[in-house]
Image: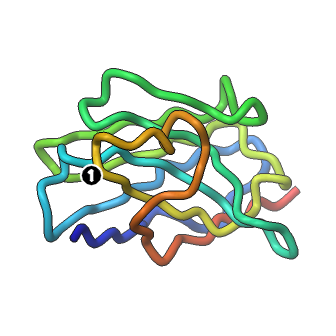
Amino acid sequence: QVQLVESGGGLVQAGGSLRLSCAASGSTFSSYNMGWYRQAPGKEREFVAGINWSGGSTHYADSVKGRFTISRDNAKDTAYLQINSLKPDDTAVYYCGAETRYGSSWALGYGMEYWGKGTLVTVSS
């Protein structure tokens, strides 16, 4: 079973950038597809971006295409989310999730099997 820990959140001004990290442990990282999700205050958790186990394929929610980039480094057991041109609407707790490599949630935007506890991103206007 994989354990996930997010980091890199914080307070940033609109137009700024952040890189979130998701460190995995407890299992072979390359056995998992990964995804980033977010939950804004008063809203449900939503899919943001997904990446397959090898890093060869990615998928994004329409609302973040062109501003968010998901990546992974299997040698470092870490997934990343680069967020550019931040907007106040991006304020949310960002979660990373994992599913076994045979799943398809990373591409379909469904929920994952394993979750981290999240990292808070606050964007000021």
The answer to whether 95 is drawn above or below residue 47 in the figure is below
Q: Is residue 37 left or right of residue 56?
A: right
Residue 72 or residue 67, whichever sits in front: 72
- Which residue in the rendered view is the most extreme toward the front? 102
Which quarter of the figure has residue 114? bottom left
Q: Is residue 30 left or right of residue 82?
A: left
Which quarter of the figure has residue 101? top left
The answer to whether 41 is drawn above or below residue 36 in the figure is below
Where in the figure is residue 81, as x and y percent of width and height? 48, 45
**How many callouts does the rendering have?**
1
Where in the figure is residue 41, as x and y percent of width and height? 82, 74
Q: Which residue is mark 1?
A: 78
Where in the figure is residue 105, as x and y percent of width and height? 50, 44
Q: Is residue 28 left or right of residue 62?
A: left
Taking the spot 28% from the left edge, 37% from the top edge, the residue there is 53
Q: Amino acid at mark 1?
A: Thr
Q: Quadrant where the N terminus lies?
A: bottom left
Where in the figure is residue 60, as x and y percent of width and height? 61, 32
